[in-house]
Amino acid sequence: MEYTTLGSTGMEVSRLCLGCMSFGSSDWREWVLDDEESEEIIERAIDLGINFFDTANMYSRGESERILGDALEGHRERSIIATKGYFQMREDDPNSGGLSRKAIEQELAASRDRLGVDTIDLYQPHRWDYDTPVETTLRALDDAVRRGHVRHIGASSMWAHQFAQALSTSDQFGLERFATMQNHYNLVYREEEREMLPLCANEGIGVMPWSPLARGYLTRPHEEIDATKRGETEEHMYEHPYREGGGREVNERVAEVAADRDVTMAQISLAWLLHKEWVDAPIIGTTSVEHLEQAVEALEISLSESDIAYLEDPYEPVAVSGHT
């Protein structure tokens, strides 16, 4: 395993972050793994040297956090745990979502309890809250850091101007600053290269992209996407413009390069991200130990400048997706 410093936090994290959206309950989404299978993958990730784990309170309505917390028992001090809050957790409680002080304090407490930790290493608003002033949110997060409930705060998908506003507000009032950005970025969705990623590079922000394999679109030829349980049942895959803007040709080129190297499409797609200087640790989600092991092997793949140009060349602008 390779390690890197996550933004300005000083924390050393594995170059791959294990995303925990696929752990929890199949009652939430059909492709999600239950306890035993989830814990097997987490334990193998630890064996492989992964020390960085990202979850969220809304994944299986808290079950993902509980499973991660249980699986990390005995490993918590050596692990970097990230979680998120924003989406409404209970239908009958509108204050169980959003980024008000009340929502942050009560949902953060619930996340800490499920994870079995006093302090969460990285706490991230899952999305931008248009109903709460950013200063209110940042003051609540700053207090959480000062109380020792959170070590660092990060942000997730939003417009670059919103992220810049949040950073400026922190600087203006002397509040804890967002240290990381968890954004939507992969070979078939590169709109973040226009504003968000240059902003992060300029501000020293750690970058941990979600959906690095485009919800599976970059793991197999495009005509075979529906062959998996997730591809067959995951309606969210079709909310993103992966098949647009040259996406099909990118998919075909990933398959071609993978065949030439005798590796998987997923490994080539991850290797491309790992060659990007502004990326610290892609968040990989998996439902099998085999795919986890293959993802780690992608760290050993070296792509030439001509390989990267060949993979990128068909890309065309697409609509912003992931936070709109």
Image: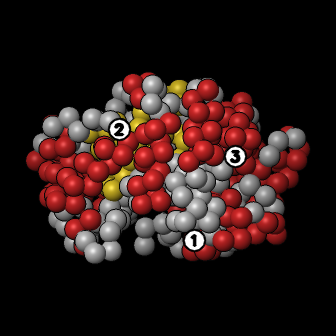
Which comes sooner in the sequence, label 3 or label 1?
1
- In the displayed structure, 321 sits above or below 296; it is below
Circle 3: element type: loop
Disc 3 to disc 1, C-alpha distance: 20 Å
Circle 1: element type: helix
- Residue at the image point whose x is 58% and y is 62% from the top: 26
For the N terminus, give its image quadrant.
top right
Residue 198 is situated, as x and y percent measured from the top left of the image, at 43, 49
Q: Which image quadrant for residue 149?
A: top left
Disc 2 to disc 1, C-alpha distance: 30 Å
Write down the residue under mark 2: 116
Residue 299 is situated, as x and y percent measured from the top left of the image, at 67, 33
Write down the residue under mark 3: 288
Disc 2 to disc 3, C-alpha distance: 25 Å
Residue 24 is situated, as x and y percent measured from the top left of the image, at 52, 54
Circle 2: element type: loop
